[in-house]
Structures are given as C-alpha cells and as structure tokens.
Amino acid sequence: PHRTAQSYYSEVPSNSNDANDPNNRINIPDRAMGSDTQNILKLAGTYLLPYGISLSGNYRFYTGKPLTRTVVVTDLNQGPVSVPAETRGTYRYPNVSLLDFRASKTLGLSRGVKLEVMLNVFNAFNASTVINQVTTLGSSYGQPIQILTPVGAGFGARLTF
C-alpha cells in the first residue's frame, strides 16, 4: 500500500513543555494537523424580492476536526505528561453544518444617500455541535468544553453617500 511521507509535525503544548522531549513525539508520525478539515462545502446566494428587499443565505458544512485522545502518565521524572493515545485523526469531532440568513432593504434618503437596514440570523438550525471536549481518557472523557454558538439575530444599518 502507498504511504505518504512521514511527518514529524510537533506542537509545543501550551504549558511550555519541551517539544524535544521524546514523550511529546509519541504517535506523531503521519498524524493530521489539529486544524485539518477533510471536506468543506460553502454555498451562498441572494434573491431579490419586490420592493427592493433582498434575502441572502450562507450555508457552510465541514467535516469535524481531528480529536486526539490523550492519557496522562504520572510516574515520570519530569512529572505528569499528557501523551497522545493514538495518532491524531483516528477520531474526529462531529461534522458541522451552519446556515445564516440576511434580509435587507435599501432606502433612498436623498440625492446619493442610501440607508440599508438588515436583519441577520446566525446558526438558523440552532446546531449545538460539540467542537471541543475533554480529550484525556478517564471519567471526564468526552465532556463538552465548547459547542457552536446558538441561534442569534442582529439588526444592522449601512449608510452610504
């Protein structure tokens, strides 16, 4: 079987551990980068209604980012070390699907002056996809740390002259 070239991409953990520590190189070869997203789909469009009203939509779908399960090894001379339990990319977070809408109308105020008023709806599906979780194996493993921001709405205006 064909294998890609080995990659020894290593991240320095945020707690400033030494990237040259051999414990930080466990399960590093051929692993995906933390921001790896295998598939991305983006669709956007605008529909013009009568009376100068426009409706816009923006749909985004992407496959989940890699999830790296870790185990904490406590009996080392340098103290506890978090070690990847498998190669990153073995498991992934859930896929993300987001839909945003905008309705707007432009009003002519005076010669060359226009006011656009708009209503934006973000995460119209109210998706509550987990995008970060506890990755250390143990009783808290899999507990959500971060989910997508829930549905939200915002009003705005743009003045052009």
Image (cartoon, helix red, strand yellow):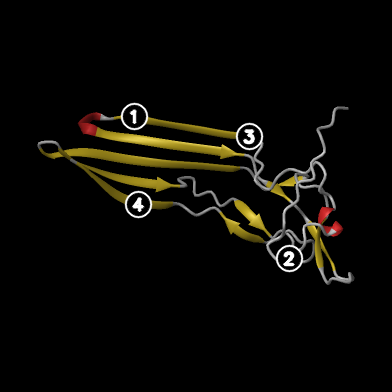
Residue found 52% across the figure and 38% down from its top = 60
- Name which residue type carries label 4: Gly
Q: Amino acid at mark 2?
A: Ser
Does label 3 or label 1 sit earlier along the sequence? 3
Q: Are marks 4 and 1 in contact (CB under 8 Å)?
A: no
Check disc 4 and report its element: helix, strand or loop. strand
Q: Nearer the viewer, mark 2 or mark 3?
A: 3
Tell me if 43 is positioned left or right of 132 in this view: left
Return the residue at label 3. 39
Residue for badge 4:
154
Callout 4: 10 Å neighbours few (<14), some, many (20+)?
A: few
Residue toward you, 137 or 6: 6
Point out residue 14 in the picture as x, y percentages from the top left corner.
68, 62
Distance Cα–Cα, label 2 vs label 3: 29 Å
Left or right placement of residue 38 versus residue 156 in this view: right
Three-letter code for the amino acid on which mark 3 is drawn? Asn
